[in-house]
Image (cartoon, rainbow, N blue to C red):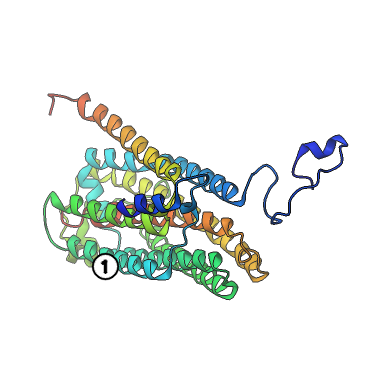
Amino acid sequence: MPDSPAIAHGAPEPAHEEHPSYLRHHFNSVEQQADTAGFAMWLFLVTEVMFFSGLFTAYLIYRNWYYPAFVAGSHQLDVRWGTLNTLVLIVSSFTMAMGVWCAQTGRRRGLVLCLSLTCLLGLGFLGIKTIEYREKIEKHHVPGFHYSLQSFVDPQSEPEVYSEYHDKPLPPDMARHTELYFSLYFLMTGMHAAHMIIGVGILAFMILRARAGAYTSGHSTYVLNFGLYWHFIDIVWIYLFALLYLISRHQ
Amino acid sequence: MGKRTAAMRTNGMSGHNQLAHHIVGPRVYVVILFALLAGTGLTVWASFIDLGVWNPVIALAIATTKAVLVVLYFMHVRYSSKLTVLTVGAGIFMFLTLISLTLADYISRAWGNW
């Protein structure tokens, strides 16, 4: 497939200098091509920051409005699962970074290993998230689906949560707003999980290509830019963990 | 910052910035990994202590420290071109602007009525 429309005009293809097969004709050099791709990736990530910051702002404002409901809602999350998931995701970011290094230094087997570990850790994260979601479904804490206020108007009905936090019963009109907490909880962790699922899919594709030696012969841009995406997801989770699980434990 | 300007000088700052293709090695990644794990341990530990209004402040400060480490080292921004640094900076600036304008609105709506 011609890279330049000039070729289509019938003029014989001008003799050009030897260049790597992965250098597109509209770039002057491999460096310029890599810089351009990296810049575009960062612009995409800035749009992602804008997207998630809308959710974070909504959380911040509603938490201030319905503070007791958000504290009681947050006490329903298990900080142990949240911590474990944070550790899983940080280690996956590390294996991804090592994958980038393997690609840059031409280590094909190392790259396949790093990408596979990253993919497995990503699946592990989603598995742990599923365990947490299932608990919310069992307790009827999914907004809009037979949502139950029992945990909040009668905290002593859940001895394992009550023994840790000793929450006072909320009046029904405030307890109603825990549904808003869980709406934001599912929206934020759900959008994060959607990004993870896309990432795991791209990782699977990259593992197949990396086995054939795709990224270890000088052209590692794809791995590098996917790494930026993966680390961005890690950063979003670092904030989600702090805001959803940690900051309301003692209030 | 000092390291980057020094490296730019040796690169002559001509043509394409060769720093964009600086390869970050495993040693840096391992150090950052342990810093991030330590930060996670620290923030979970701090959440078990009752610090009143300081609990959210400390949790967000540690989260931001971890995020900065990820951006600078895992995402190579410390070794990247000025264009990348400017793009990241513009993103953070836009985020802070939008969030502070929104909060200014919500805070001032009920001004004097609390």
Q: Position of residue A79 (x, y in %)?
A: 28, 63
Rendering quarter of residue A177: top left
Q: How many marks?
A: 1
Q: Amino acid at mark 1?
A: Ala
Residue drawn at (40%, 68%), measured in percent from left and top? A91
x then y, percent, for residue A209:
65, 65
What chain does badge 1 belong to?
Answer: B
Query: Left of B27 or right of it: where is A169?
Result: left
Q: Quadrant of residue A167?
A: bottom left
Out of A5 and B102, give the one closest to the viewer: A5
Nearest the viewer among A154 and B25 is: B25
Can residue A156 be seen at all in this image of the molecule?
yes
Number of residues whose C-alpha sits closer than 10 Å to that of mark 1, classed few (under 14), some (14–19) or many (20 or more): few
- Can you say whether A20 is above or below B82 in the image? below
What is the x, y in percent for residue B27?
38, 70
In this rendering, the answer to whether A122 lies above or below A243 is below
Residue that numbered label 1 is attached to: B38
The residue lying at 56 percent from left, 62 percent from top is A203
Q: State the image coordinates of residue B4 (x, y, percent, origin top left).
A: 36, 52
